[in-house]
Each structure stands twice: as structure tokens, then as C-alpha cells.
Amino acid sequence: MIESLNKPKSQDLSNFYLITIVCGAVTISLITLIAVDCLPVGLRQPGSPVLQSAAIIGSMLLILSFLAILAKRFGKSGKSGFKAHVWLANIGFILIIAHSGLAVLSIPGILLILLLIIAVLGIYGRLVLSRKMENTFGTKRTGFSVPDETIRNELKHLIAYKQRLLKDIDPSANEAFFSIQAKNWIKTPILAFRYNHAVGKEAGLLETRKSVPFIQAYYRSIHRLLSIAFLLGLIIHIVTTIFFAGYVAEDRHIYWWHITKWGS
């Protein structure tokens, strides 16, 4: 007991360090763009060995950053996952910017725009929305109001239903603090779906989302959907440039180094 109390806790990334990392990433990206522009024409094309290697490494880092933020869903430390997410995402961002040359007026440019929106949303969520969330929990009177008898009865049956499901999902867990994790989706997917559905129904009865502004209520859903869209678009971009280079290039010369070098 004493050892657990004395054990140092993992510190979260402060807003100051977050802003410093982001500003550093933006500055390095701009310097990189200037440096790339000074390279010979053959080397500053997105498909050149240097810039395509940057794209490969950057893409891997962005995927790893997506997985890092899911650490909490696997029972790992959310704070450590967030730190890894920030560092991996910013380094990946620099490499992707270098690869793209900020060419937003193209089909791959849609991915770049998505990435920029996701980054801005993430920064906004951490620096602005998190503070609004704190104020909401501290001042929202509707959160402490007593619902009418009909809703109370529905909530009573719903909580009892969640507790029954939880006995099969995780008998040691407390319904008041439990949330579905990735391991639950893997071990008991049907029960996890039912429990998640019950949580959503409970939120609907309490009207938690209606009592806050739209961006505050749906921020996570929007951020998650845009991230998934970016990852799917990234996979499509990688597959098409590697296996359908002729279609991507149209009537232009195919200069990607992995094709010209390997004679594909």
C-alpha cells in the first residue's frame, strides 16, 4: 500500500510543451519545404527516393500515433499514450509535409487537408475544449437535476441491465466507472456491443449531449471519423501509387523510384 502511494505517477504532457512541440513541428516543416525546394528537380518530386522514403516513414509514424492514442482502450496508461501520440504525429506530419510540398490542389492534397484539419482539431480539443469540459462539469446545473419518475424507472432498469452484462464482460469491474475497452470487443464482441448500446441509450435519457454546444458534444466523434477517413485514404493512396502507377500518372511519365529502379 505504502509502495503504491510512493510510486511516482506518470505526468501528462502540459499545454506549454504541447504548444512548443507543435510550433517546433511547424517551423521545421517550413524549413524543410525551403530546403526541398533547393534540391535538384529530380530529387524534389514526391516520388523521388528521398521524398518517397519520407512519405513511407511519415505514414508509419502517423499510423503508430493513431495506435498510441488507443492505448487506454487496451488498459494501458492514457497519459503515456498521449505523449507518444503527440511526438509520433508531429514527426510524421513534418515528413508528410516534406513529401507533399503542400500541393493541396490535387487528389492526394485532400489527404493533406484532412491531416491539417485533424491536427487543428486535436490542438483545439486539448487547449480549448478540455477547459470548457471542466467548466461544464463544474457549473452545469442540469447535470445535477433530478429526472422525472418515468425516466428514473427507465434508468433503473437500464443500469440493472448493464450490471448483468458486466458480470459476463468483466466481473471485477464497477458499472459506474466501466467503459468498453478493445479487449472486451475482442473477447465478447456481442456483449460489448449490447453494453455500448445501453450506454448510448442512458446518455440519451439523460440528454447529456443536448445540454452542451454541438462541438463539445460531438468533438470526439468528428475527430475519430476524420482520422479513420485519413487512414483509409492513406491506404488507398499507397496502393494506387504502387500497384496502379499508370492510372495515377495518366499520360505523364512514371518517375516513382521504386518502379523505375525495379523495372515494374
Image: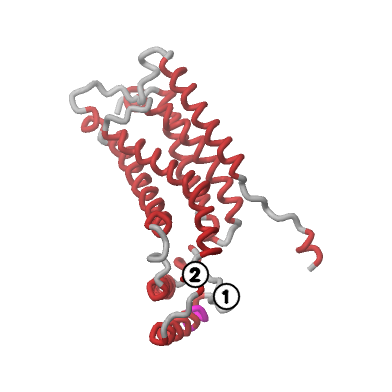
Main secondary-structure element of the magenta-colored stretch: helix
Image: 31 above or below 147: above
Viewer-closest of 211 and 229: 211
Task: Give the mark nearer the N terminus: 2 vs 1.
Answer: 2
Circle 1 Cα neighbour tier, 10 Å, few/some/many (<14 / 14–19 / ≥20): few
The answer to whether 34 appears left or right of 114 in the picture is right
Colouring of the image:
secondary structure
Image: 10 above or below 167: above
Viewport quadrant of the N terminus: bottom right
Mark 2 or 1: in front is: 2
Tell me the amino acid under the disc marked 1.
Ala
Q: x%, y% of residue 144?
A: 51, 73
> Do labels 2 and 1 touch, CB within 8 Å?
no
Viewport quadrant of the C terminus: top left
Q: x%, y% of residue 63?
A: 45, 45
Magenta-colored span:
164-168
Q: Which residue is mark 1?
A: 173
Secondary structure of the residue carrying tag 1 is loop
Q: How many marks overall?
A: 2
Q: Which residue is mark 2?
A: 141
Per the model, the C-alpha gap separating discs 2 and 1 is 29 Å
Residue at (42%, 14%) from the top-left corner? Answer: 39
Viewer-closest of 4 and 206: 206
Residue at (41%, 16%) from the top-left corner? Answer: 37
Tell me the amino acid under the disc marked 2.
Arg
Q: x%, y% of residue 111?
A: 34, 38
**Is 167 included in the stretch rendered in magenta?**
yes
Which picture quadrant has residue 115? top left
Circle 2 Cα neighbour tier, 10 Å, few/some/many (<14 / 14–19 / ≥20): few
